[in-house]
């Protein structure tokens, strides 16, 4: 059983048996993988703090011949959304992870998608406002997958934001100066494109809506 080490983004987890977890993660060099993290749900698990969606981790895993699931040996956090400054930012980390999971192909490397995820995480942790960051992420995700129409009818402000995403990294998205109105317009447009591609609304949208309705302390 060969041992692989890689940088990875945790996309989601779900329970397996009484103490384990299935972990879906995206690597830069080998694409999306699914693995078993044994005893991950125990209080003293070696995976503690490393399996939150969108966490950038350094992983080691064994691939077993003719088995779909790999065996996770360890996952060491590099950057965690848990240090984000607000509950809204943490909610958006689940949204970003869900969309990457939906678009990433099994065992098919996509370094650009991996870089988009890690750069978005860094911006989120740095305190970049979530609304322009989310529109930036959606725009790039749709463009990378070839499903962003070139003939969209957008306002001048919204079109300027879309044209500007190629010039800045996620950390610099505020420099594009998008108005609240333009961001709402793009949210509506992107949501329709995402829903059309997935044939459903992303599950994490509900969490974001609930956070928006919650008054600030």
Image (cartoon, rainbow, N blue to C red):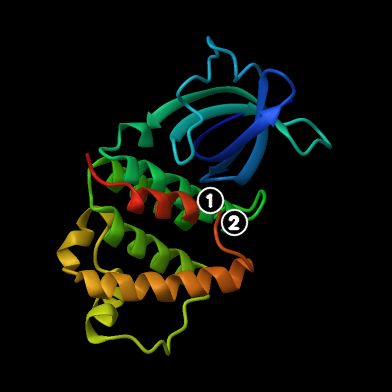
150 is higher (above) or lower (below) than 77: below
Cα–Cα span, label 2 and label 1: 6 Å
Residue drawn at 22 percent across, 80 percent down: 157
Residue 3 visible in the shown view: no
Q: Secondary structure at mark 2?
A: helix
With 103 as the anchor, is 67 left or right in this view?
right
Q: Quadrant of residue 170?
A: bottom left
Q: Is residue 17 above or below residue 26?
A: above
- Is residue 167 something that shows in the picture? yes
Q: Position of residue 122 (x, y in %)?
A: 31, 43
Point 67% across, 51% down: residue: 106
Give the x, y percent position of residue 116: 40, 54
Camera-side residue: 4 or 70? 70
Camera-nearest residue between 212 and 34: 212
Residue tagged 2: 102
Residue 37: mark = none
Relative to 195, say whether 25 is above or below. Answer: above
Callout 2: few (<14), some (14-19), or many (20+) C-alpha neighbours within 10 Å? few
Which image quarter is the C terminus in? top left
Check contact, mark 2 vs mark 1: CB within 8 A: yes
Mark number displayed over residue 98: 1
Instruction: Determine the residue located farthest toward the top in the rendered image.
Output: 44
- Which image quadrant is residue 13 in? top right
Q: Position of residue 3 (x, y in %)?
A: 64, 26
Q: Mark 1 falls on what kind of element?
A: helix
Percent from the top left, x then y, of residue 208?
A: 41, 52
């Amino acid at each position: 059983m060969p041992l692989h080490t890689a940088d990875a983004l945790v996309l989601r987890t779900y329970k397996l048996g009484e103490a384990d977890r299935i972990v879906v993660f995206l690597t830069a060099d080998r694409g999306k993988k699914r693995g078993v993290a044994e005893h991950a749900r125990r209080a003293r698990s070696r995976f503690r703090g490393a399996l939150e969606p969108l966490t950038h981790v350094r992983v080691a895993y064994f691939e077993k011949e003719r088995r779909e699931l790999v065996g996770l040996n360890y996952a060491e956090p590099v950057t965690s959304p848990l240090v984000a400054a607000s509950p809204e930012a943490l909610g958006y980390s689940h949204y970003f992870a869900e969309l990457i999971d939906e678009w990433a192909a099994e065992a098919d490397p996509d370094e650009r998608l991996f870089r988009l995820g890690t750069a978005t995480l860094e911006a989120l942790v740095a305190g970049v406002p979530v609304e322009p960051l989310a529109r930036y992420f959606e725009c790039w995700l749709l463009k990378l997958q070839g499903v962003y129409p070139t003939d969209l009818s957008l306002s001048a402000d919204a079109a300027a934001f879309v044209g500007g995403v190629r010039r800045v990294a996620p950390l610099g998205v505020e420099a594009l100066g998008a108005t609240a109105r333009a961001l709402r317009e793009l949210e509506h447009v992107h949501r329709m494109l995402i829903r059309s591609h997935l044939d459903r609304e992303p599950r994490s949208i509900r969490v974001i809506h609930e956070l928006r309705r919650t008054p600030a302390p």
